[in-house]
Amino acid sequence: MRGRLIYAFVAELHRLDVEAMAAFDPDGPGPLRSGLDPDFREPVLLDGDGDGVAEPWRRERPMVRVPCQVEPEALEAVRMSTMGNAPRSSIDLVFHFQDLEDLGLVDRDTGEALVRPGDRLGAIRTRSGELAQAFRSPLFVVEARPLGFGLSLGRSRRNLLLVSFQDRVAARSLV
């Protein structure tokens, strides 16, 4: 017995495609050799629109819808700065490993969940597909960790994955 989610919704996940980013040269003959920063393993910043300010260059896998249980933390909580209001958002979603396995989101060799830091949450929908929550600023996975390892004494298996999402304020300078 692995249990089940309660009050389930559906999360729209956009997984970061690290392999595609590492293999692609985003600036052609320029100094970059990969779309992935070699030190931080994050998307490189490029000035794609010529305004003098670099934007993150990302490649994502096709969106996947995963049943989840929603544990809201803070959505657009007010945080004042010298430049005005800089709202912060964070939300935790609980996924069932059975759903992740059914969707091919668990590595067969290691058993590791393939929902990882850098993946983006697009929206939360009801089970019938109606939009329940969209996000003005993107929310990214900052932590994904197994919560429970089953309810059965005879054949225990892990059952839940807690995934924490937060917005990531891009630090940009006009100088």
Image (spheres, rainbow, N blue to C red):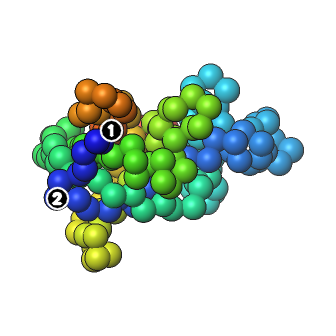
Task: Give me the disc on residue 159.
Answer: 1
* Residue at 62% across, 22% down: 39
One can see residue 148 in this view: no
> What x and y, as percent, mark residue 1?
28, 42
Q: Residues within 10 Å of mark 1 (few under 14, many from 20)?
A: many
* Residue at 52% across, 32% down: 111
Residue 160 vertical position relative to residue 13 in the rendered view, above or below: above
Tag 2: amino acid: Tyr
* Pick the front one: 37 or 170: 37
* Pick the front one: 46 or 167: 167
Query: Which residue matches tag 2?
Result: 7
Tag 1: amino acid: Asn
* Residue at 70% across, 42% down: 19
25 on left or right of 137: right
Please tell me in which quadrant of the rendered image residue 94 appears: top left
C-alpha separation, residue under disc 1 versus residue under disc 2: 16 Å
